[in-house]
Image: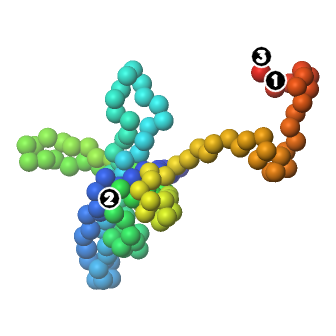
Amino acid sequence: MNKVILMGRLTRDPDIRYSNGQNGDQMCIAKYTLAVDRRFTRNGDDQTADFISCTAFGKQGEFAEKYLKQGKKIVVCGRIQTGSYTNKEGQKVYTTDVIVEEQEFAESKKTEDSGSQGGYQPQAAPSTSDASAEGFMPIPEGATDDLPFKKR
């Protein structure tokens, strides 16, 4: 099975081209690079993101042309495709791309307009009076001695 799911931000606006399709009609081809954050770094590696080349054809390419811009956070589902070519110096160059099958926005327009980078925004813990208004009952001192998850 060849399936990949990525979430990241576009490093630049998509590069859009049109080519002749099988029936002589025009087919949109959109190429863009997605910066995908790494969860962990190894051996003090400073790079915190991988830059993944993506290619979208047809309707997916048209979607990219119309809606995707630099900095937009999206989720891409697709497949990995490898290839190679010989450059001007006669050296063989190997490529790895994600062929986009689906793409969706990963943040709301409101989040994007506010300038936030998205993600979880922690909120302050409610005070005791707020907690009781939410339907929680305060636990009296000493009542936690027999709880299995108590602090030690």
Residue beneath disc 3: 152
Mark 1, residue position: 150
Observer-side mark, 2 or 1, equals 1
Q: Which mark is residue 130?
A: none
Counting other residues with Cα less than 10 Å from the Cα at mark 3, is it few (<14), some (14-19), or many (20 or more)?
few
Which amino acid is tagged 1? Answer: Lys
Q: Position of residue 23 (x, y in %)?
A: 33, 82
Which residue is pictured at 24% across the width and 70% down the height?
17
Which of the colour schemes (rainbow, by chain, secondary structure, one colour) is used?
Answer: rainbow
**Cα–Cα span, label 1 and label 3:** 6 Å
In this view of the protein, which residue sits in the foreground, 27 or 44?
44
Mark count: 3
Q: Is residue 70 above or below residue 94?
A: below
Name the disc covering residue 70, or none.
Answer: 2
- Residue at 31 percent across and 68 percent down: it is 29
Q: Residues within 10 Å of mark 1 (few under 14, many from 20)?
A: few
Q: Are marks 2 and 1 in contact (CB under 8 Å)?
A: no
Residue in the image at 39% along x and 59% along y:
72
Q: Quadrant of residue 56?
A: bottom left
